[in-house]
């Protein structure tokens, strides 16, 4: 086996459940869907699985992940955050960063 491949194998890629929950909540907010609507779409008998996903206590099954990716119009991987250096996409906090920057400038002016 080549040295480059061995180095890739040394660090097992894992998923960050909490950050994945943040990504899922972001996609839900962007699409304007509620937990109840997600529950109905996935034909779940109760909303608890969705709440567990959002809190980072569990991940959706592959079937549910696929259905959610189709619902949100993204790849399945965009609903999962790995445990790497930057698990959550910068776009999620872009609006918040802009608003905080604007408020900071506004406070200095006052």
Image (tube, grey):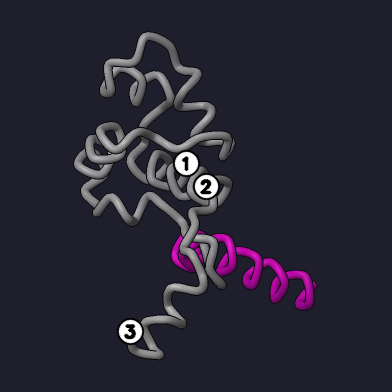
- Verify whether residue 24 appears in magenta: no
- C-alpha gap between disc 3 and disc 1: 41 Å
Magenta residues span: 88-110
Q: Earlier in the sequence, mark 3 or mark 1?
A: 3
- C-alpha gap between disc 1 and disc 2: 5 Å
For this rendering, which residue is in front, 84 or 12?
Answer: 12
Determine which residue is flagged by label 3: 1
Farthest bottom residue in view: 3
Which residue is at a point 49% across and 34% down the rendered structure image?
53
Which residue is at a point 41% across and 52% down the rendered structure image?
80
Q: Considering the numbered disc 3 on the image, is that residue within a helix, a strand or a loop?
A: loop
- Mark 3 nearby-residue class (10 Å; few <14, some 14–19, many ≥20): few
Rendering coords of residue 39 (x, y %) = 36, 20
Determine which residue is flagged by label 1: 25
Depth-wise, is mark 3 or mark 2 nearer the camera? 3
Q: Quadrant location of residue 29? A: top left
Mark carried by residue 88: none
Depth-wise, is mark 3 or mark 1 nearer the camera? 3
Which residue is at a point 46% across and 56% down the rendered structure image?
81
Determine which residue is flagged by label 2: 22
Q: Considering the numbered disc 2 on the image, is that residue within a helix, a strand or a loop?
A: helix
**Does residue 16 sit above or below 65 in this rendering?**
below
Residues at marks 1 and 2 touching, judged by CB atoms closer than 8 Å: yes
Rendering coords of residue 64 (x, y %) = 29, 32
Q: Is residue 44 left or right of residue 82?
A: left
**Does residue 48 sit above or below 75 in this rendering?**
above
For this rendering, which residue is in front, 109 or 70?
Answer: 70
- Verify whether residue 90 appears in magenta: yes
Q: Is residue 60 left or right of residue 103?
A: left
């Amino acid at each position: 086996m080549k040295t480059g491949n061995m180095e890739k194998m040394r660090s097992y890629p894992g998923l960050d459940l909490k950050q994945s929950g943040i990504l899922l909540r972001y996609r839900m907010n962007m699409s304007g869907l509620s937990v109840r609507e997600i529950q109905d779409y996935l034909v779940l008998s109760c909303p608890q699985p969705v709440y567990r996903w959002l809190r980072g206590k569990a991940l959706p099954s592959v079937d549910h992940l696929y259905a959610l990716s189709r619902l949100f119009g993204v790849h399945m991987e965009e609903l999962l955050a790995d445990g790497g250096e930057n698990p959550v996409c910068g776009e999620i906090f872009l609006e918040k960063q802009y608003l905080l920057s604007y408020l900071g400038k506004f406070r200095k002016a006052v």
